[in-house]
Amino acid sequence: MIAVFLLPPLLPPLLGALASQGSPASAPGSRPAAPALEMERVLAREVREANMLASVRTLVGFGPRMGGTSSGERASAWVAERFRAEGLAVEVVEDPPLRAHEETKWSVEAREGDSWRPVAGAVPYGFSKAGSGSGPLRLEGASPGGGVLLLRRRPRGPLPSGTLAALVDGDAVPGTDYSVLHPLAGRAGDVPVFAISAREAGRLREALEGGPPIEVRFSLEARISESSPKTVLATIPGRDRTRSILFCAHGDADSGGPGADDNASGVAVLLEIARAVSAAVRSGRVDAPPCDLRFAVWGTEIHSTRAFVERERAPGRSGALAAVLNFDQAGFGSGDDALFVEPDDVPRNGTLVRSILAAALDHRGEEGFPSRFTSNRALGGTDSYVFQEGAAGPPSVTVFASAFGQPSFVEPTTGFPRSGDWAAKIRIDHDRFYHSSGDLPENTTDLEPFNMGWCARVALLGALRAAPDLR
Ligand SMILES: [Zn+2]
């Protein structure tokens, strides 16, 4: 059983978000009138976890979806098609080019005795050079050099001459054959470099000590290019077309792995919000939203968001964005079942964060809503922060289920309601498969379908409630 502690709620005026049947306004600090709450439930019920789980699986099936790669192109084309199918106006934008890497096919095998067997957990690091070959497996610093090096840590610079390829065991997800993936920098990628399972590396080290030589053969198909990520933008027209609320998510798996939680989950939430609102408006069950609802699936995290902000600053477009709601890791948390909103320590975010938390509070206990939720101070590292890089950006928050690969502990910000049993410091949940080859639907999103449902419903209702108060 979960105790509930509530800090004094300082709720803004909660206008009936969906005006057709709702009462026009509620007094400050009170719940919306019953008809307005009922209209919110109409929208909430339209959000389907099954659709989001299916979207995650489809997106992961396209590969890592990195900006400027063929995998990214396939994913953005599919996302654009999904928005179009719901009747949204869609624009696909080419962002400034960046250096992109795409690994399409690889194998690593070891021969011990007469038989070849796959090396467990082998997965290439981003910006590894393509290539194939075979050679003796050697430990770091061994003499003679050359061959295939077995390293404890990911290389940071050029490898010794004669090195054909490298296997690395330094960055494993504990207790699994999955590895955390990082892009290689500079000349570290002069040869194919693969992460391998730490357990496998241990076996190979043991076999090498005093045993017969081990031959390794490898192949990697990979492409490094200077290419433009494709960002997909879509719009649901609102009653007031001079202002908009932007829902966004990075479309790439920024580590270069499968990225089910990070961040197919965020894209899936976006698609489902768009579908649910469109379906409810089309059927006449709710009015058009109070202002335009815009959607952005960034071709590349941060890079594409910065390009968007630049474009929005162009003459004639400034001032239109009333709020930004970003979704990143919306689908899984390893140590808790809770919804988080950040950052609440940025003054311009106050109204938006409170509206989101108020929507969660007012629907707590209903199917599809979380019983544990909180806001937290800035953790950084995701697209919503790009909108706060300038002095005059719109309120901009991220709604999420986990952040990073380890829990974070932060002091609560006073003045925001939360629900659930929280310690003196807020424990921000983590994803143990963060940025790893194990961020697969079966390890993350499939296990906790409720997370994406919570994020979609709470963020959508919170944004609509805040709309009248955001300029
Ligand atoms: Zn992310």
Image (spheres, rainbow, N blue to C red):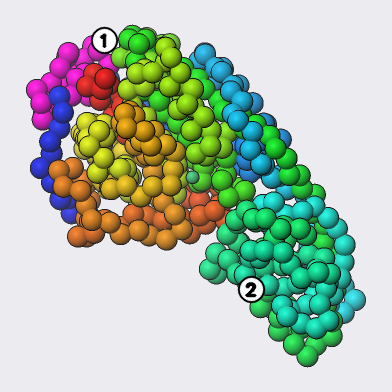
Q: Neighbour class for label 2 at 10 Å: few (<14), some, many (≥20)?
A: some
Decide which of tag 2 and tag 1 comes sooner along the chain. Answer: 1
The residue depicted at 60 percent of the width and 61 percent of the height is 179
Specify the label residue 455 is tagged with: none
Range shown magenta: 14-38
Task: Name the one closer to the observer, 403 or 5.
Answer: 403
Instruction: Determine if the magenta segment contains residue 164.
Output: no
The residue where tag 2 is placed is: 152
The quarter of the picture where residue 158 lies is bottom right
Does any atom of ligand 1 lie closer than 8 Å to the CB of label 2? no
From the top left corner, tell me how far across and down residue 353 is, in percent.
Answer: 26, 36
- What is the three-letter code of the residue carrying label 1? Ser
Which residue is more in the foreground, 131 or 18?
131
CA separation in Å, label 2 and label 1: 63 Å
The image shows residue 344 at horizontal and vertical percentages of 26, 42
Q: Name above or below for residue 401 compared with residue 88.
A: below
Name the residue located 66 percent from the left edge and 78 percent from the top edge: 202
Q: Disc 2 residue type?
A: Arg
Can you give x and y, in whole percent of width and height, for residue 281 in the image? 39, 13
Badge 1: few (under 14), some or many (20 or more) residues near its Cα, within 10 Å?
Answer: some
Which residue in the structure is indicated by mark 1?
20
Q: What secondary structure do most residues of the magenta stretch adopt?
A: loop
Q: Residue at x 24, y 44 (%)?
A: 345
* Tag 2 secondary structure: loop
At which x and y percent is residue 382? 44, 43
Name the foreground residue: 194 vs 289: 194
Residue 44 seen from this side: no
Ligand 1 lies under 8 Å from the Cβ of mark 1: no
The residue that appears at 15% across and 32% down in the rendered structure is: 11
Q: Quadrant of the N terminus?
A: bottom left
